[in-house]
């Protein structure tokens, strides 16, 4: 894909570092809810479907406005919107910690989650512009990896802190720290590159970003994101049925996210050197197998299985994010990423509620087997994207 416009004057490594640091904080906000869900469900006597609905409310709100966020970035720039979004989510966590009942909690989850719309499309656009040619897939893989550092820290700290503070105290503490971090990050403003180049007569003919290949890429991303969100939402319940306590579940999630961080980084590197399509097929195949194995694997196998599951579950995304940059012209890339993330994160938001309803009717074993089959469907669907996933 030809690049247009003026190149960033800030060193690419600095852009990647600042965008990655913001990603760490943002992903920690959204990952910390996983180990808290059983505690919330116990306090409010929630069903699986209601528990999934709560996660859908939080993540869904962070998915709906990503395309408008891309449009706003073309006018105001990405960096300030990134910081404002993080501060918004942090305030939302504080409000959720004060919720008097489930209805209020769900409503505040929607309100707080809206700030998450800025993170993924704007950070990806920044990094893709900073690396116009060589190293883009690895750089986006690094950005992707950085988010999982937050996911690793979040569940581990939450699992321990919840034993003393409860889920409400955890949300109040993390939300307050998030506001302070967002304010402190304003000092890094000079590290950011200029905003995306404006559309001119020369670039206008390439203004559209939609294509059949882009639509197919979005479909693959939707299936991948749905499995990731629903699998992580209901895995604590599978583990709980097997006698694993909250602290151990928090540890296993830390291992999952550690594997996911490694998968995002390593798969981005492998995609550039060994071919992306083979990496996608390998990671999705391992993910499907792990979903089934969690149902009956012996206790000693849970730790290595969690590590392998995390690596495969998240590794695919680095390849798919880089493919967006290949298919969308630079001056439309913020909105292109906005459209892609809107589709995939809406799927991630809806999946827990939909799969939760299935679990209520058929049980967790049927749920995890169904998710495994949906994941395997990605293999034939991704074949026509061989050229985009080079």
Image: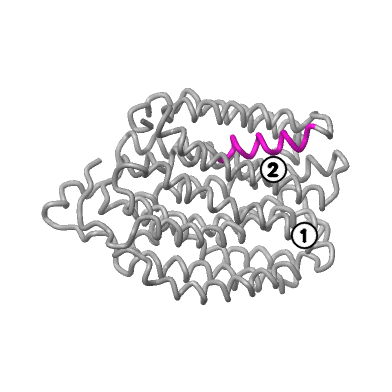
Residue 40, numbered label: 1
What secondary structure do most residues of the magenta stretch adopt? helix
- Mark 2 residue crowding within 10 angstroms, few (<14) / some (14–19) / many (20+): some
Residue 113 appears anywhere in the view: yes
Element at label 2: helix
Coordinates of residue 72 in the picture (x, y in percent): 35, 65
Give residue 326's quadrant in the image: top left
Coordinates of residue 19 in the picture (x, y in percent): 45, 59
Count of marks overlaid on the render = 2
Residue 179, numbered label: none
Say which residue appears at 23% left-offset and 59% top-offset: 197
Q: Is residue 34 magenta?
A: no
Say which residue appears at 33% left-offset and 54% top-offset: 130
Residue span colored magenta: 301-314
Q: Is residue 303 magenta?
A: yes
Element at label 1: helix
Marked residue nearer the N-terminal end (2 or 1)? 1
Distance in Å between CA atoms under marks 2 and 1: 18 Å
Residue 357, numbered label: 2
Image quadrant occupied by the N terminus: top left
Coordinates of residue 77 in the picture (x, y in percent): 34, 66
**Pick the front one: 256 or 235:** 256
Image quadrant occupied by the C terminus: top left
Residue 57 appears anywhere in the view: no
Q: In the image, is 1 to the left or to the right of 148? A: left
Closest to the camera, between mark 2 and mark 1, is 1
Say which residue appears at 11% left-offset and 55% top-offset: 201
**Pick the front one: 204 or 17:** 17
**Pick the front one: 74 or 126:** 126
User: From what the image shows, is residue 270 above or below residue 25?
Assistant: above
Coordinates of residue 4 in the picture (x, y in percent): 20, 51
**Pick the front one: 140 or 232:** 140
């Amino acid at each position: 894909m030809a690049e247009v416009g003026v190149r960033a004057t800030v060193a690419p490594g600095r852009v990647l570092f600042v965008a990655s640091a913001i990603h760490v904080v943002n992903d920690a906000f959204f990952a910390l809810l996983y180990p808290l869900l059983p505690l919330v469900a116990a306090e409010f006597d929630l069903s699986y479907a209601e528990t999934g609905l709560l996660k859908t409310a939080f993540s869904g709100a962070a998915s709906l406005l990503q395309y408008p966020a891309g449009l706003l970035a073309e006018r105001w720039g990405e960096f300030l919107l990134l910081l404002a979004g993080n501060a918004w989510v942090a305030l939302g966590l504080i409000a959720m910690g004060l919720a008097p009942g489930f209805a209020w909690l769900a409503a505040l989850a929607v309100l707080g989650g809206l700030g998450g719309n800025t993170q993924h499309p704007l950070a990806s656009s920044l990094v893709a512009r900073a690396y116009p040619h060589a190293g883009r897939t690895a750089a986006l893989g690094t950005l992707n990896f950085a988010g999982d550092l937050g996911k690793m820290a979040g569940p581990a700290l939450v699992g321990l802190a919840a034993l003393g503070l409860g889920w409400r105290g955890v949300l109040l503490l993390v939300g307050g720290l998030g506001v302070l971090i967002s304010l402190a990050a304003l000092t890094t403003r000079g590290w950011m590159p200029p905003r995306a180049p404006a559309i001119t007569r020369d670039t206008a003919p390439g203004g559209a970003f939609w294509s059949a290949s882009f639509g197919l890429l979005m479909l693959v991303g939707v299936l991948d994101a749905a499995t990731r969100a629903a699998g992580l939402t209901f895995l604590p319940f599978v583990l709980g049925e097997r006698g694993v306590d909250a602290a151990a579940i928090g540890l296993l999630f830390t291992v999952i996210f550690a594997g996911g961080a490694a998968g995002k980084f390593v798969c981005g590197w492998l995609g550039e050197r060994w071919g992306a399509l083979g990496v996608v097929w390998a990671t999705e195949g391992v993910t499907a197998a792990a979903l089934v194995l969690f149902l009956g694997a012996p206790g000693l196998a849970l730790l290595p299985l969690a590590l392998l599951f995390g690596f495969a579950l998240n590794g695919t995304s680095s390849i798919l994010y880089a493919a967006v940059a290949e298919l969308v012209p630079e001056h439309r890339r913020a909105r292109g990423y906005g459209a892609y993330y809107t589709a995939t994160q809406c799927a991630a938001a809806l999946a827990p509620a939909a799969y939760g309803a299935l679990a209520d009717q058929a049980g967790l074993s049927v749920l995890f087997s169904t998710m495994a089959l949906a994941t395997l469907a990605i293999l034939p669907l991704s074949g026509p994207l061989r050229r985009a996933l080079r």
